[in-house]
Image (spheres, helix red, strand yellow):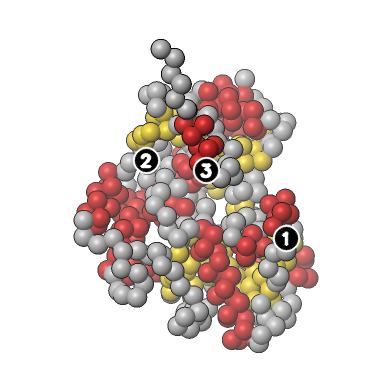
Amino acid sequence: MVNTAPTIAEREAASIIQTYGRAPVTFVRGDGCRLYDEDGNDYLDCLSGIAVASVGHANAAVAAAVSRQMTRLVHVSNLYYTVPQVELAERLRALSGLDRVFFANCGATANETAIKLARRWGQKTRGPECYEIVSLLDSFHGRTLAALAATGQPKKQAVFQPLPSGFVQVPANDIDAMDGAVGPQTAAVMVETTQGEGGVLPLDVDYLQALRELCDERGVLLVLDDVQAGIGRTGSWFSWQDLGIEPDIATLAKALANGLPIGACLSTARAAVFDYGDHGTTFGGGPVVTTAALAVLDEIEHRDLLANCRQRSRQLTSRLMAVPGVTTVRGRGLMLGAVLDSPRAAEVNQAALSNGLLLNNVTADTVRFTPPLVITEDEAEEAASKFEASLG
């Protein structure tokens, strides 16, 4: 008998707004760095849900913590105190050196918080005309309207005009261009230390340090978008900690709860100028997601995953550089981009999927590697071997 039931792809197309170009695979289970499809085939995951599942799929410690919390308290809103939220804020303060935390639901809403906070700071310190945010070309800060306006990718902005005003983009690694853009109307400069969606492009350390000096000289805030690069992804808790700079405001999301939706905006006491009612969220910082995040931080610390990140970064970088067809490998930690000798990243990504390896063609000539921080030496070698076969 012929099976006439619709496929999962057909069901998805009939029920979900079509905004994603999905790969032809349906995953049903995960374990560490492995994912399994509905036919039982296994895949080595070197994307980790775009730098999210850093402590591995179906992590037992995170699952146990979430399970316990689900039977105790799930939601009461931010009209009341909850213990996990305060404990997570205290942990993030201690790890980051920043003073205050606001919990959001994702990277875009964390960046919306940062934008609003910077504008409020500008109003309070320099007057109503101080509201502009200067960011970088090829940056990515999210898909809500203000975060999209801060994003330096005109192609993503084109169909949603008019976007909110008060945003200017300049080229990355050009301190003279930034110097010319920062003026009396500027409240903050907003950058990623490594531009993830822009092609895994690490900003020069000298540039970042000069940017910090410029912000200090002009009396504006420095906002660091650590949504993708934070929580151990670059080999330190936060990407700026190895770069000789400190932000006034920073944003987090992806890896913070290993797949549960959470974002966070951190700030110095000087920049934390919101008044009651200036900002809010129904779900942000709920007991379940903050419990998950606490378990993630414990896992990274107890398993010394920052050290493993640095070791596997050196291994993968060296191994990928030796692959024929790769011109360079750029990035920091386990946020790496293998740049190809021609614009065939999409083709290579498809071949890698067929070889049981999950990657991402982030630009036409660059394939992104963001494996879980728990990846082993053997798994890193397996990833490099499958990638090399995919280029063949």
Give the residue type at disc 3.
Ile
Q: Position of residue 28 (x, y in %)?
A: 38, 33
Q: Nearer the viewer, mark 3 or mark 2?
A: 3
Query: Would you name the residue on which mark 3 appears?
Result: 16
Give the residue type at disc 2.
His
Q: Earlier in the sequence, mark 1 or mark 2?
A: 2
Q: Nearer the viewer, mark 1 or mark 3?
A: 3
Residue toward you, 385 or 168: 168
With 93 as the anchor, is 123 left or right in this view?
right
Estimate the spatial distance between the alpha carbons at disc 3 and disc 2, rounded to whole Å.
25 Å
Q: Residue at x 46, y 73 (%)?
A: 280
Helix, strand or loop at label 3? It is: loop
Q: Position of residue 164 (x, y in %)?
A: 68, 68
Tell me if label 1 and label 3 are in contact, CB under 8 Å.
no
Query: Would you name the residue on which mark 1 appears?
Result: 161
Query: Dot 3 surroundings within 10 Å: few (below 14), some, or many (20 or more)?
Result: few
**371 over 77 or under it: above or below:** above
Query: Would you name the residue on which mark 2 appears?
Result: 57
Helix, strand or loop at label 2? It is: loop
Asked which quadrant contains residue 36, the reply is: top left
Give the residue type at disc 1.
Gln
Helix, strand or loop at label 1? It is: loop
Label ID, residue 93: none
Q: Residue at x 55, y 64 (%)?
A: 111
Q: Nearer the viewer, mark 1 or mark 2?
A: 1
